[in-house]
Image: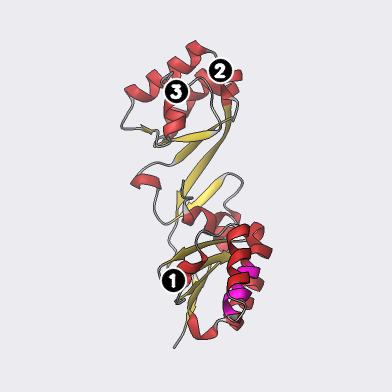
Amino acid sequence: MRKHHNKLYYSKYKVKTVFNLPGSLMFYPTTDQYLTNLTKQHPELPDLNFLADFIMKHRNSMKFRIQDKKAIFYSDKERSNVLINKFTKYWQKTEIVDPKYDTLGKDVIGCTKLPHGKFKYQVHLKKDAQQHISQSERQALWNLIERNEESCLVTNKYVLDYLIGKYPYCYHGYFYVSQEKMLTPIYMIAQKGIDKVIKFVKVKNESNKKTSRA
């Protein structure tokens, strides 16, 4: 499942760096094994080898998207500068999050668009929720979600299969809630099986500091 990239950007990584990178699809899939094999196959391409090594070395301290002729990195300023210095001719723009969005708080995510346009909360279930929620509580939770389809949304197939009773186990996952008032009955029914609740706050990124090639 693709992560919500505004979440990555505002929650943890404060610098977004965009490159128009020819041959970027060569880096997909981006597993360490694939990238290692790629560098062995193309020792004559120093830029390719540099970027493959950079991704493998820093993948736990940044996020990235590889698209057709475009590569987007979400990172800190230091790593962004390393990439810009190496790939200056491909660099298109950099955005740095407005500092006022650094203090949104734990489990609060700034985003330019709410998930699916309207959902302000993401309720995460524990990976072993079936051990904490009884069958009757699971059924009650699903009945609540089903009765309030305008306010609740389950997008994950495995979470849905668990909630409707099709599959007996829950391997972590979440569903969306649009209104704060819905959280109270959800907690009353299934508090022991809830890992956390993420709140989305809509922000404007027009105030972010932007730099780009002239």
- As drawn, the label of residue 82 is none
Q: Is residue 154 a member of the stretch shown in magenta?
A: no
Residue 161, percent from left and from top:
43, 26
What whole-number distance in Å separates the C-alpha atoms at marks 3 and 2?
A: 11 Å
Q: Is residue 170 left or right of residue 180?
A: right
Image height of 4 relative to 178, above or below: below
Amino acid carrying mark 1 in the image? Lys
Q: Earlier in the sequence, mark 1 or mark 3?
A: 1
Q: Earlier in the sequence, mark 1 or mark 2?
A: 1
* Mark 3: few/some/many CA within 10 Å (<14, 14-19, 20+): many
Q: Residue furthest bottom?
A: 214
Could you tell me which quadrant the C terminus lies in? bottom left
Q: Examine the rendering and report whether any part of residue 66 can be seen.
A: yes
Say which residue appears at 40% left-offset and 48% top-offset: 114
Q: Which residue is mark 3?
A: 163
Q: Which residue is mark 1?
A: 70
What whole-number distance in Å separates the C-alpha atoms at marks 1 and 3?
A: 39 Å
Amino acid carrying mark 3 in the image? Leu
Callout 3: SS: helix
Image height of 65 relative to 197, above or below: below
Q: Residue furthest front?
A: 41
Q: Which residue is mark 2?
A: 133
Amino acid carrying mark 2 in the image? Ile
Q: Is residue 119 left or right of residue 74?
A: left
